[in-house]
Amino acid sequence: MGYKETFVLHWTEFWDYETPKVVVVKNRTLGIIYRVIQLLIILYFIIYVFIIQKAYQERESAPESSVITKMKGIGISNSSMGIKIWDVAEYVNPPESANVPGSKCTSDLDCMAGEMELLGNGRKTGRCVTHHDSIKTCEIQAWCPVENEHSKRDSILTKAQNVTIFIKNSIHFPRFEFTKGNIQKNRHPAYLKKCTFDEETDIYCPIFPLSLIIEKAGQSFDSLSQTGGILGVIINWNCDLDKAASECKPHYSFRRLDSATQDSKASHGYNFRHAKYYMENGTEYRTLIKVFGIRIDIIVHGEAGKFDIVPTMINIAAALTSIGIGSFLCDWILLTFMNKNEVYSAKKFEEVLKERIILAVNEHGASEQELTAIQPENCKHC
């Protein structure tokens, strides 16, 4: 057969129509396999897809959210300057080394006037001066003395365990026009003045003691008072809007977010610097304060779902289609491993060549049904 005839044959077969043919196979083993596969597929869609994943719902996973925080509490420190009272105006804040690379020199030519090192403490004057012994460094114009990591440190964190954080959070799912907050509307205002958050009894109380957040994050005041740290308060809203609005509740979790949890010594903990300036005898001075503190990051996640006919029909169609996997697998077993696979194949696949049957009817005068039954050349077994 030439290329032309082959092409014509395939082109003709392209327009053939295939219709399913039901063949009942009396085989108990194959029947059990088929029903078990169907059962597993049905259970998967009912339990996992529809019940656990709620695939019958339309979903929205990016809620609009706002967070407001306030702190209340008093801290006390006792240093060489005496006892100091710290309130929220002082310990609530938003947000260099004497050994500087490139600072050593042998002459003034090594110190370009006006140049500033990235990790330096000031601007170079252009002079190379003796630092100590025979070591010379570039002179800089800066606040003196430069920062000393071994300077006296006062810790007030251990005295601030009773500081409380007020976290007001509200979320809005625009697709469903649903809004909810972590404070109940029908609560008396006096409730917020005396309540403390408890995930079992007072989930709608937004007052969190600092000690509770640190404890839930698996940390301790002792370690945080030395290095500081970043703690995360994660608020998760998973709302099934097919239920009552009261069933949509915030779920809180707490963890430490800075590098201390990754066993990293680089940028350990959390700290920042600020300065206080003053004049004395006509000279301006400043006190540089390096603060090791606790930063609280509020992270909000959310997802809402509500029944919708479109995802319901799509997943039902997917379930019905998936049931056909059982037929495909059992057909493969039937036609590959069964002893009578050739017989089963002959029963399952049949190609009707109508043109030849019509021609035979015209030549022999037999009916189409008779010729289909008696002439093997009209049936092609696969």
Image: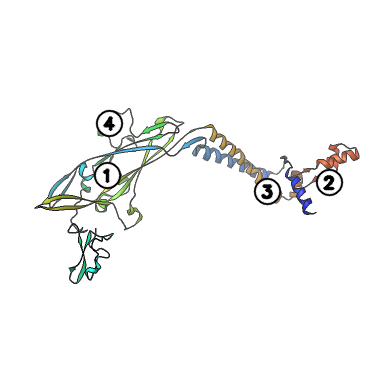
Q: Residue at x 54, y 37 (%)?
A: 46
Per the image, the residue denoted by label 1 is 211
Identify the secondary structure beneath mark 1: helix
Label 2 Cα crowd, 10 Å radius (few <14 / some 14-19 / many 20+): few
Report how far apart the C-alphas of labels 2 and 1 lie in the structure.
89 Å
Q: Amino acid at mark 4?
A: Tyr
Q: Is residue 311 left or right of residue 5?
A: left
Who comes first in sequence, dot 2 or dot 3?
3
Q: Nearer the viewer, residue 66 or 19?
A: 66
Q: Which is closer to the viewer, label 2 or label 4?
A: 2
Q: Quote the CA–CA distance across marks 1 and 4.
A: 21 Å
* Outermost left residue: 281
Q: Are marks 2 and 1 in contact (CB under 8 Å)?
A: no
Residue named by callout 3: 332
Q: Residue 24's image quarter?
A: top right
Residue corresponding to mark 2: 377
Residue depicted at x 38% and y 32%: 180
Query: What kind of element bears circle 4?
Result: helix
Which amino acid lies under the numbered mark 3 shown in the image of this protein?
A: Trp
Q: Which comes before the other along the chain, label 3 or label 1?
A: 1
